Structure formats: structure tokens, C-alpha cells
């Protein structure tokens, strides 16, 4: 599969990250088409028009035990 990235997202790359705070909590979003984290307020990537991910694919809340604790 060809990459759809045109290189326009390079201007939106984050400058620095803090180790104890996740990228998503810092306001960064992930584009799976460009395979880059970007900082913007848009829903879609300006480069490949793909939907930006605003949450991690798997987090600690998805474990069975914590899911049941949070449900009740």
C-alpha cells in the first residue's frame, strides 16, 4: 500500500514531550496514514485527509478487572 503522506504534516510536529504525561493529554493527535503525531485542532489530517486518533489504541482501563470496577 502506498503512503498517502504529502509531507505537509511536518510543520505540525510537536517540539517536545514530557515523559510523565501522555501525548494525547498534551493535545497531540496521531495520524495513522502519515505515522506521525501532530498538534492541531482539526479532526482530519491536513496532509492525507485521514482521521486523527485522539485516544490510545489500548490503555490500562481496558483490562477486565478495572472495567468491572469502573462499571459499578
Image: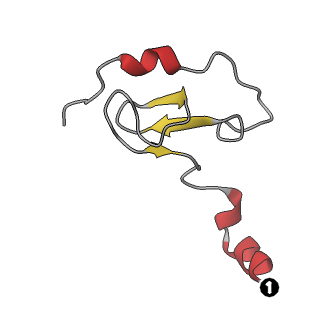
- Classify residue 16 as left or right of residue 40: right
Say above or below: 57 vs 5.
below
Residue placed under numbered mark 1 in the picture: 72
Of 69 and 47, the residue lying toward us = 47
Could you tell me which residue is drawn at 60 percent across and 21 percent down?
Answer: 14
Q: Quadrant of residue 72?
A: bottom right
Q: Is residue 25 left or right of residue 48?
A: right
The x and y percentages for residue 56 are 58, 49
Q: Which residue is at 67% across, 75% downward?
A: 64
Residue furthest to the left in view is 1
Could you tell me which residue is drawn at 71 percent across and 41 percent down?
25
Q: Determine whether, in the image, residue 69 is placed left or right of residue 33.
A: right
Instruction: Give the image quarter of residue 28.
Output: top right
Q: Position of residue 40 (x, y in %)?
A: 55, 30
> Badge 1, how many Cα within 10 Å: few under 14, some, many 20+?
few
Display colour scheme = secondary structure
Amino acid at each position: 500500500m502506498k503512503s498517502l503522506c504529502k509531507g505537509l504534516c511536518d510543520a505540525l510536529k510537536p517540539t517536545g514531550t514530557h515523559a510523565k504525561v501522555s501525548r494525547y493529554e498534551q493535545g497531540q493527535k496521531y495520524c495513522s496514514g502519515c505515522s506521525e503525531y501532530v498538534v492541531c485542532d482539526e479532526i482530519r489530517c491536513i496532509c492525507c485527509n485521514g482521521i486523527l486518533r485522539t485516544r490510545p489504541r489500548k490503555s490500562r482501563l481496558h483490562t477486565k478487572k478495572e472495567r468491572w470496577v469502573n462499571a459499578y
